[in-house]
Image (cartoon, grey):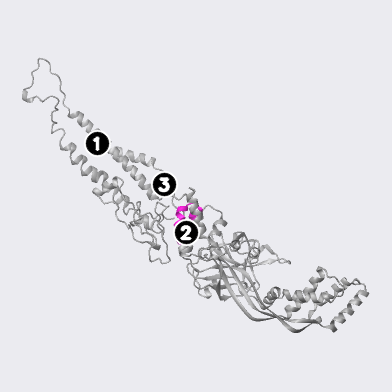
Amino acid sequence: MKIAAGAAVAMAVALPALPAAADAPDERPDVPVGTWLAARTQPAVQLTSFTYTGTVAVPTSTINQTAFNRLVEQATATVASGKISSDERSIAKWLFQQIAADVDTYLASTTPERTVEAEVGGLCTGWWVTPDGYMVTGAHCVQVGETELSRLFAQQALAKFNQQDAKEIISGLRGLEADEEIVKLAQQIYVTFNTNHMQLRNLKQSLSVVQSLPGGGVDKTAKPVPAELVSVGESYPGKDFALLKVNGQQNLPTVPLGDDSDVRTGDTLYISGFPGLVTNTPFFSLESKLEPALTEGPYNAKRTTQTGVPYIQTQAPSYHGNSGGPVFSKDGKVIGMLIAGTVSENGEASESESFVLPVGIIKEKLGEKNIKPAQTTTTTRYNEALNDFFRHYYSDSLPKFREVQALFPNHPYVAKYISDAQQAISAGKDESPKPILLWVLIGAGVLVAAVIIAVLAKVLRGRGRRRRHSEPSFVQPPPSAVQPPSWRQLPAGQAPPPAREAYGQAAYGPAAHGPAAYEQGAYGQAAYGQAAYGQGADGYGPVAYNAGGYGAAPYGSAPDHSNPQYRSAPDHGNPPYGSARDHNHPQHGPGPYGYPAPPHGQAQPPSGDQTRAVRYGQFTPPPNDRPS
C-alpha cells in the first residue's frame, strides 16, 4: 500500500484550505464599535411621551387705579430728578418695568373668567427591559411637579390671552408708538399675572410609547401605544427612575444589563436616545425623527449627590429628549441611564457634562418590583443575523432575519436588513463560508479516487508481469534436433496452458484480491467505518456535532443558501426548521428551537457492500449543523 499512502499525502497537499472556524456567535465583527452597537440596541430604544390635558381658566385683569396713580407720580418725580428721560417712550418703559416687577399691586382680577382646553407634554427616551413590555425611563419623563406643570400650561395655553391683554394696556398709552421692547415688557406683565392666577381643572395624564406597526418599520405608520406607570422614583438629583408597562406585548427586542464594575474612568460610553432638536423640528421626516441617535464620550468621573445618590459624569453629548435613554459600554451592555446635563443661561445643553444614573440603581429598582430583565429568541437571532450581515455572510443572515420578522412583525429594522441582504446576494457580494463538512467530503472523495486509481494501476502492472512470465518460448530447434511427437504439438497460434504450480490460487485467490484486500484490509471498516464518521473524538459523531460545537448551535443551514428551509413560529414546540442534506426528506428529528438534531453517534456507512458505496462517493453526510 505504499502507492496508496503516497497518494494520500499528495492529496492532502492538493486539498484547498478549509475555512476557518466560525467566529463566536456574539463576537463583534470587524466594524466600528458604534456601528455594531447602534444596530444591536436601536430596536429596543423607543420614543416615549407624557401628556397632560385639562381646562385652563384665568380671570380678566383690570388696572388698580389707585396704585397706578401713585406709580405715575413716582415717574414724574424720577423724570424731574433726571434719572430717566422726559420723552414718552422712556416714561412708558419705566412704568411697564415697575408693573412687571409687582403685578399683583397694579393689576386686579375681575370677571368674566376665560377658559381654554389645553394639552401639554414632553418627549423622552425609554428602552425595553423584558420581552413582555416592561420599559425603563426617567422619573422626570413621566411626571411633572405642580410648579413646572403650571409653567408649561402657561407657556402653551395662555399665549393668546397674554397677547390680547398686552395690546389693551399698550392702547392706553395715548399717541405712543410701541416698539418691540415695549411690546415684550407689556406681554411679560400678563405672562406673570395670568400664570399666577391660572387654575387647572379636569387634569388628566397619559403615558405612551411610540411603536411601529406591522410591516411599517420606523416610518409614518408608527403610533403611540398607551403605557401604565408601574413605579416612579425621585427626579434628579434623586434616584431618577420610572418603570412602565405596555400590555399585550411579546417577543420584544431588549438590551442586556451590565454591572457598575464594567466601566471606569477613561472608558468610552455610548448614549442612545431621541434628542429634542430632531424630534421637535419640522425639517426632518417622521422616519428620521423615530430613529435613535448614538453619541459617545469618555467616562469622566463618578459623582455623588448630597443625598448619597451616585451619578456618572461623561462627555458623551446629550440633549433635551435624551433623558431616560440607555447608556452602553463598548460590549453592548447597559451601564446606566441618561438623566441630566448642565444647561446654560439661554437653555442650551452643555455637551461636556452629562450625568448618568448607574445600572446598579436600575437593578435595585427593578428588584423592588420583582422584574427580571430577559431576552428572547428575537434579540438573540437578530444579533446573530447582524454579525453575519456585517461579515458579508448574507445568505447565512437571511433565515435568521426572517425568523426575527416572524417572531416580532413590528420590528422596525429587520425588513430593511432582509432587503439589503437579498440585494447583496444578487450583486454577488455574498461571502458566506461553505460548511466544513462539505470541504471534508470533497477532499475525501478525491482521496478515494486517487487510492482507487493507484490500486488499479498496481493490479494492472501485476497482471502484465504475470502475463509475460506465462507465455512459453518457442525456440526454433536446429535441423538435427528431434521433433516432438505429434501428440505434443499444438495447433498453430495456440498458447500452452499455464502451469498450475506457477500461477494458481496463490496469485489470484482470496489472499491477494479477496476480502482481505478489498474488504477488510483496504476499503472496509478501518477506512470508512466507525473511525472516520462514527463516534471518535476526531470525527463527526456526538463529540464534534454535539459537545464540540455543532450540536450546541441552534442553527443549521443547507449548503444551498439560496433556498433556505427555515420557517419561523413563536411556538418552539413545532420545529420551524428541519433540513438534512436532502431538504425534501429530512433525516433527523428536531433539535433546539426546532432545528434538525445532529446524528447521535450512528455509524454513517456500515461495512460490507455499503462500504464500497461510500468508497465511490455515494456516502450521505450528516445534516449541516454548522454554527453561524
327 part of magenta stretch: no
Quadrant of res 549: bottom left
Q: Amino acid at mark 2?
A: Phe
Q: Inspect the image, locate mark 1, and give the three-letter code of the amino acid beneath it.
A: Val
- 484 sits left or right of 97 in the view: left
Whether residue 10 sits left or right of residue 407 in the image: it is left
Is 215 situated above or below 187? above
Residue position marked by numbered label 2 in the rendering? 401
Which quarter of the figure has residue 220?
Answer: bottom right
On screen, residue 143 above or below 389:
below
Element type at mark 2: helix
Give the quadrant of the C terminus: bottom left
Q: Main secondary structure of the magenta part?
A: helix
- For disc 1, the marked residue is 459
Q: Earlier in the sequence, mark 2 or mark 3?
A: 3
Residue found at x 76% / y 75%: 164
For label 3, the residue is 18
Q: Residues within 10 Å of mark 3 (few under 14, many from 20)?
A: some
Q: Residue at x 41, y 43 (%)?
A: 16
> Callout 3, which amino acid?
Leu
The image's mark for residue 81 is: none
Asked if residue 172 can be seen in this view, the reply is yes
Q: Position of residue 525 (x, y in %)?
A: 26, 48
**C-alpha distance separating marks 1 and 2:** 56 Å
Residue bounds of the magenta highlight: 386-404
Which comes before the other along the chain, label 3 or label 1?
3
Q: Secondary structure at mark 1?
A: helix
Asked whether the residues under the numbered discs 2 and 3 touch, taking CB atoms below 8 Å apart as contact, a structural biologist would say no
Front disc: 1 or 2: 2
Mark pair 3, 1: CA separation: 34 Å
